[in-house]
Amino acid sequence: MKYLIGFILLSMLGCQKSEQKTIEPSEVIEKAIEFSGKSKLNENVLRFKFRDYSYKAMPTCEGLQFERLSTTSPTRDVVKNGELTRFYQDSIVKLADTTAFSYYESVNSVHYFTQLPLRLKDAAVRPSYLGEEEINAKAYHKLKVKFTENDGGEDFEDAYIYWFDTSDFSMDFIAYSFLVNGGGLRFRKAINQRTVDGVVFQDYENYTPKGTSQKLEDLGQFWEKGDLELLSKIENENVILEPSALNCN
């Protein structure tokens, strides 16, 4: 009889495992974008201020165009089709390749985080589902994102972790590794979530590990334990959405 009971228990466990739903990362991303309303950025002009610059993201027939305008000089940086062009007033400024790349990285990075989670549908993105993780007694879908070399730009070797609330799919935490400037790890906690014309925007507290042994995948738990150090706050001001006059027909 005990063998029969054991067989029945094993059969029940096998059925439970087979009935568990496999979660595709694309499902989480779609629901996160729906919650954020960020799809509207494909059809509207976004303006905001970050530190000493005004930023603008504008849809074009060739994709999004990103701009950065200095508030202290008539200098404007334009990123389009993966390249940066600097203007002083209306004249193009010739830049060394290393300088142009540095400016490109700076402009693209600010816009990238503002556009999330919409940018997780970019062609270069390769997401994987890492399961659920609990932070501050709340359950999160945990996704890891890497990039293809062909479409991922100079930073294709960087890796990101995203934590999405399992109840509403808000993007509450981000962690990433990077190789430029000596490399490192960063962890961001979303703060000041607000909705502008149906689109959710949020600022971040930006953390770095206190030690050097932490792994990217473990940063959520290290933050909860207080083992990360606050570096800065990422705060975007004067966020405005404007209808775009784009017509590609």
Image (cartoon, rainbow, N blue to C red):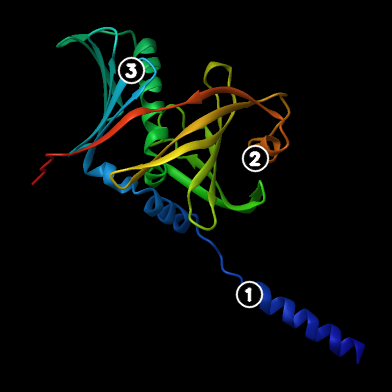
Vertical placement of residue 246 versus 180, above or below: below
Vertical placement of residue 235 versus 36, above or below: above
Vertical placement of residue 157 versus 134, above or below: above
> Along the horizontal axis of the image, is 23 left or right of 94?
right
Q: Are marks 1 and 2 in contact (CB under 8 Å)?
A: no
> Along the horizontal axis of the image, is 115 left or right of 46?
right
The residue carrying mark 1 is 18
Find the distance from the CA under tag 3 to the CA under tag 2. 31 Å
Q: Residue at x 78, y 79 (%)?
A: 10
Q: Are marks 3 and 1 in contact (CB under 8 Å)?
A: no
Q: How many marks?
A: 3
SS label for mark 3: strand
Answer few, some or many: residues within 10 Å of disc 1's Cα (few below 14, many 20 plus, some between 14 and 19). Answer: few
Q: Residue at x 40, y 22 (%)?
A: 105
Residue 121 at x, y percent in the picture: 38, 47
Find the distance from the CA under tag 1 to the CA under tag 2. 30 Å
Find the distance from the CA under tag 3 to the CA under tag 1. 53 Å
| Residue, far left | 249
- Quadrant in which residue 149 is drawn: top left
Residue 155 at x, y percent in the picture: 46, 28
Residue 212 at x, y percent in the picture: 71, 24
| Residue, far right | 2
Q: Which mark is residue 220?
A: 2
Q: Nearer the viewer, mark 1 or mark 2?
A: 2
The residue carrying mark 3 is 53
